[in-house]
Image (cartoon, rainbow, N blue to C red):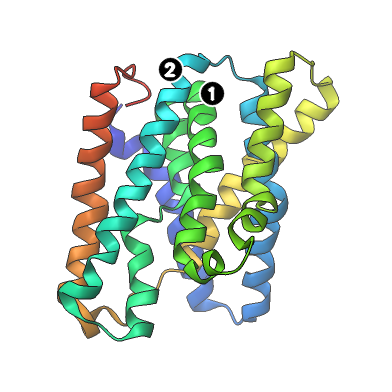
């Protein structure tokens, strides 16, 4: 079965979100509430369950997380080079630089699930749990300038907290009761589906014409530079094929 066919259901959900946003008159508050439900309830439940129950090789997993975090930091550094290179206005730069290093967690998890099954889902859950808070802090860099702002932001991030709690359960060997596992499994399925729908509803193409050169630079970082950096680092550290 081809990769495109495997991912067709996920892209169909994204398209559904785009269509629903265009043809319905649902208030922006509805979509904002839906995004909050996914971010604070559904997605953390999925990350917790995936990391708590998956058999993980913590030696290679630690190296994988090193690669993921170093790749994110590389994206942040390359993204900030756009400021002296293109000299954009503050608002345009702040809104655009995030595209160089932030990734869509819902799409990433859907792809990992399709290609790697439960193990792929658990590995991507770890990457999301530790990388997304870092990317969020980099995107809202003003937090770093406040005393203790970075630590507070990390400590209250629901994705990081859910991942750490899942790892604690995994390390300790505490069994998850069957009814709780079944509930979390259903929540996880809802998280990916609703998350992809909100991705489609949030698609916006306006504004790209204002800084085509900088937009192309950010896209090149995300689609060319960061995959190359991740592959190079992962190969050097001897990551297994699934983690690459």
Whether 12 is drawn above or below 32: the answer is above
Residue 60 — which label?
Answer: 2
With 154 as the anchor, is 94 left or right in this view? left
Q: Residue at x 58, y 58 (%)?
A: 150
- The mark nearer the N terminus, 1 or 2, is 2
On the image, the x and y values in percent for residue 77 come to 29, 57
Say what secondary structure mark 2 lies in: helix
Label 1 Cα neighbours within 10 Å, binned few <14 / some 14-19 / many ≥20: some
Residue 218 — which label?
Answer: none
Quarter occupied by the N terminus: top left
Distance (Cα) linking label 1 and label 2: 17 Å
Whether 169 is drawn above or below 80: the answer is above
On the image, the x and y values in percent for residue 205 come to 33, 75
Q: Residue furthest front?
A: 147
Q: 4 or 105, which lies in front?
A: 105
Say what secondary structure mark 1 lies in: helix
Q: Residue at x 79, y 16 (%)?
A: 174
Q: Residue at x 56, y 41 (%)?
A: 129
With 192 as the anchor, is 7 left or right in this view? left
- Which marked residue is nearer to the observer: mark 1 or mark 2? 2
On the image, the x and y values in percent for residue 194 come to 60, 54
Q: 102 or 23, which lies in front?
A: 102
With 120 as the anchor, is 49 left or right in this view? right
Whether 5 is drawn above or below 177: the answer is below
Residue for badge 1: 118
With 141 as the anchor, is 37 left or right in this view? right
**Circles 1 and 2: CB distance less than 8 Å?**
no
Q: Is residue 72 visible?
A: yes
Which corner quadrant of the image does residue 108 belong to?
top left
On the image, the x and y values in percent for residue 33 come to 69, 68
Q: 109 or 52, which lies in front?
A: 52
Q: Is residue 190 visible?
A: no
């Amino acid at each position: 079965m081809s990769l495109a066919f495997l991912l067709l259901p996920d892209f169909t959900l994204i398209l559904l979100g785009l269509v629903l946003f265009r043809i319905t008159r649902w208030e922006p508050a509805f979509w904002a509430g839906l995004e909050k439900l996914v971010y604070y309830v559904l997605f953390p439940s999925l990350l917790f369950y995936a990391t708590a129950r998956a058999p993980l090789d913590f030696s290679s997993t630690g190296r994988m997380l090193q690669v993921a975090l170093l790749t994110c930091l590389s994206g942040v550094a390359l993204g900030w080079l756009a400021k002296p290179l293109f000299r954009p206005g503050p608002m345009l730069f702040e809104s655009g630089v995030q595209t160089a290093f932030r990734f869509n967690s819902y799409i990433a998890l859907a792809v990992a699930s399709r290609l790697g099954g439960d193990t792929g889902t658990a590995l991507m859950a770890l990457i999301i749990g530790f990388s997304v808070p870092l990317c969020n802090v980099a995107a809202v860099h003003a937090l770093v300038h406040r005393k203790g702002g970075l630590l507070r932001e990390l400590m209250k991030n629901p994705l990081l907290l859910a991942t750490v709690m899942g790892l604690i359960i995994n390390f300790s060997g505490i069994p998850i009761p069957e009814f709780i596992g079944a509930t979390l499994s259903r929540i996880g399925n809802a998280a990916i589906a609703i998350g992809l729908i909100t991705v489609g509803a949030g698609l916006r193409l306006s504004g790209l014409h204002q800084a085509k050169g900088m937009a192309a630079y950010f896209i090149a970082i995300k689609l060319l530079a960061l995959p190359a950096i991740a592959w190079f680092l992962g190969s050097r550290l001897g990551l297994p094929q699934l983690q690459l």
